[in-house]
Amino acid sequence: MGVAIDKLNETQRSLLLLNGDDLFGENGELREYFPDADFVKYLSCDVSKKIFEKFQKNCESQNVEECLKQCVLSWLNEENSTERQFQLLSVGIAALLAFVQDNWCGPSLKESVPWLQPCMHTTDEDCVNVFIENLVLDAEAVVSVARHPELLVLARAVFLSELPDLESTLWWRFRCIAVHQQILEEKSPQLHEELVTLKDRLLQCEFLKKDRDLSILAQLEISQVHLSYHEVQPSQQLIQAALEEANLSINLTGALGKRTRFQVRELAQLTLDVQSSTETRNKPCIQKDLPKDLKLDDDVRLDKIKFSNSVDGQYNDLTPIQQACVLAAFVQTQKCQPKDKLADEELLAYLTCLLSQPQVWSFQLSGLLFRSKIESNHSRTVERSMTQTQVLVDSVNAPAPESWQRLSMIFCSHLCPSWTLEEQLADFFVSLGCINSALDVYLRLQCWEQVIACYNHLKLRHKAEEIIRQELAKKETVKLWCLLGDATDNVDYYEKAWNLSNKKSARAQKHWGLYFFHRKQYAEAIPHLQESLSHNSLQTTLWFQLGYASLQQEEWSIAATAYRRCCVLDPENFEAWNNLSKAYVNLGQKNRAWKSLQEALKWDYENWRVWENFLIVSLDCAVMDEVIRSYHRIIDLREKHLDVEVLEILGKAIIDNLPDCDGVPCGALLGKALELLGRITAQITNNWKVWRLYSRLTRVLPNPTPETEFKAVQHLQKAHRAAVVDASWVNDTEVCLEVIGLSEELANVSLTFANKSTSKQQSSSVLSSSKLSLKSTLTKIKQQRLDLLTGQVEEVLLPHYNNLDGLLQQIAEASAA
């Protein structure tokens, strides 16, 4: 090829950016190597055949990838020049892009690599199976509908080889492994580890430090992989860094506008404010071949928000890289938010911005699919969401545009494989009750779990078993045996699946464990779930289920481990954090429980039950300021909430000025506690213990004023009235003693106030009211609790009764003075 170093570097850059116009256009620099952007044709050129000449002559081994790697190594050993390395890199890129074209964006390939199958000396079907077996990792099967797996095997053989002169090989290896993960039925720990290692090496590459666009793109692609593993925090850091490097500011803002046709009054509507400090010059794009954005045809709702100010809802021109940043920010926001109507409005603001400037095929398709998923939850837009998804499926299968236009920026587009897109359409059919239509799609895509669900819905469960047995007759797989077990409720089939995998399949143990889990046989489920997770530790939902089963069996240590792993994989799962705290509490690790609940509240701030748990654990950990804050938050969410035990422990800590967890005296929280009790008593007026506590806290205020002292007495009077409002109090000895104790406290406080008060009117009022309350209490006790043999109040009450009677006399004397 004789490619000069500068030109070589520029070509590598263009390939990484996948700028189709520059590479594959009429005068594109790689047009001669990729005629009509036909990547398969390039794999059949003389250079490709020469590289893999030995493979074509003798490939008897089942390990095809290893044979291909040996060919690559031999080619490099002959002459390890930069030119040869680039030839190899081009072969790998062609293979990977052809695979992505056929399985992601279309149009479908007409043929595969002509020289591959004859070398295998097998039939078409056997050849495909050989390549699929080479892509199985951690016993995780490849999705059955993936097409032309030989292309991915070929790409892996190239990218997993060392090409030291070409730094971009690392990036293509990262892309290849990310694509490989997406065609596996479950997450692969091995691939995850490889991606993490590659990420660190890739971000340190010198060529990224010299090229802003490449640096931004790398960060966005890595963030996309992080999100696929539910790793929200590292993804967020990378997206934020990319936004800063792109000089892009993205903020949600409000503007007045109308959403419906007959809306009279304008209301605040969400829109996205995108500001860039970099001038952009976009090339005009041909929009006719992009996936069509269907207009909303509704009698009430407008297709787009009609803002009162024409400037609102208008966006500055964005480059493809900047659009990629907006898309990444959208997906990040979606992953981090709970699903509710407000969150949907925020997400739609991002998509409206993205779809307002259609220029990248993959972004347009992803944006429209994301919008369809959101709109499927709303009655006014559900019809468009289904029709739009059908249009997207048709767009993938359409002959135009050319593949190189579709592949532009595809690795940061969050685009799903084509079979997932069709599966989404079938899911819409199910949600609308079109079960038979959905069933046709599921059967074609071999989505056997959904097929079973459809047949169960149609009350044709026997058909599910029949279909699976037909597939098993063609070829036995672990997945099919597991699904037969699900369809027949026969655990023997799970054991067959386990043995078929040579006791390596995480799926077999998962189905086996869930069989018992769903029947609440948790003791039997736990060992199977643990076995599954030992083979594949990236099963987030299964960690949660293991934790739940362990909680039910009071296996606190197993539960803590399971929920901890679940929280690492899915940090926004508030239920996992909440349940983790429960496990820690039962293990006596209250500080860890408290920290777990803090995390739970980050992801579900509106759940009063989590706040209640946080309140109780905060109390146990003596984090008293958080006790008060939590109580306020629970009242915000429930309007009324009463936990007398918590309030009394809090009150005692403040009155006795006990140290909190940091050694700070709790007396400092007196003002906040009084504010809380004031709020509680405004809503709940009939609990005497709360009023008594309110009085006690008011009485310990430093430098009390006559007004606060009078309030303290009033609170205690309200406590007494609330205590005796139910006439049955006198019949229960324990309650009766509590009322007498409250009456004694009222008498003492009243006398103290009368002695200190300078207002004779207030003193007289307090003594008079207390006198009536005590007299009524004594009379009630004498009437109901008189011992007929002795003619006196019952012995258990007598000393308290006499003491209260003495206090009544003192009040009478003070009143008369």
Image: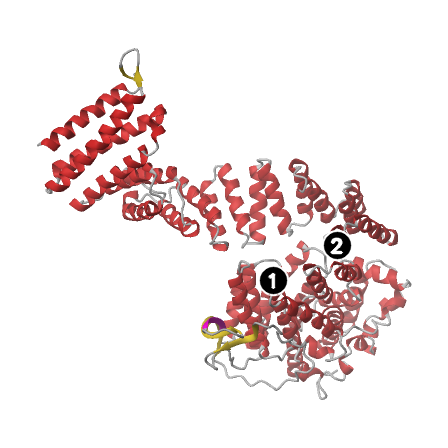
In the depicted structure, whether residue 584 falls above or below residue 602? above
In the depicted structure, whether residue 269 falls above or below residue 3? above
Q: Amino acid at mark 1?
A: Asn
Provide the residue span drawn in magenta: 267-272
Residue 534 percent coordinates (x, y): 67, 46
Residue 268 percent coordinates (x, y): 45, 71
Say which residue appears at 58% left-offset and 71% top-offset. 327
Front one among 686 and 393: 686
- Quadrant of res 660: top left
Q: Horizontally, is 498 left or right of 361 in the view? A: right
Say which residue appears at 48% left-offset and 37% top-offset. 588
| Furthest residue in direction front, as rendered | 783
Q: Earlier in the sequence, mark 1 or mark 2?
A: 1
In the depicted structure, whether residue 83 falls above or below residue 536? below
Residue 566 percent coordinates (x, y): 58, 49
Badge number at residue 454: 2
Badge number at residue 377: 1
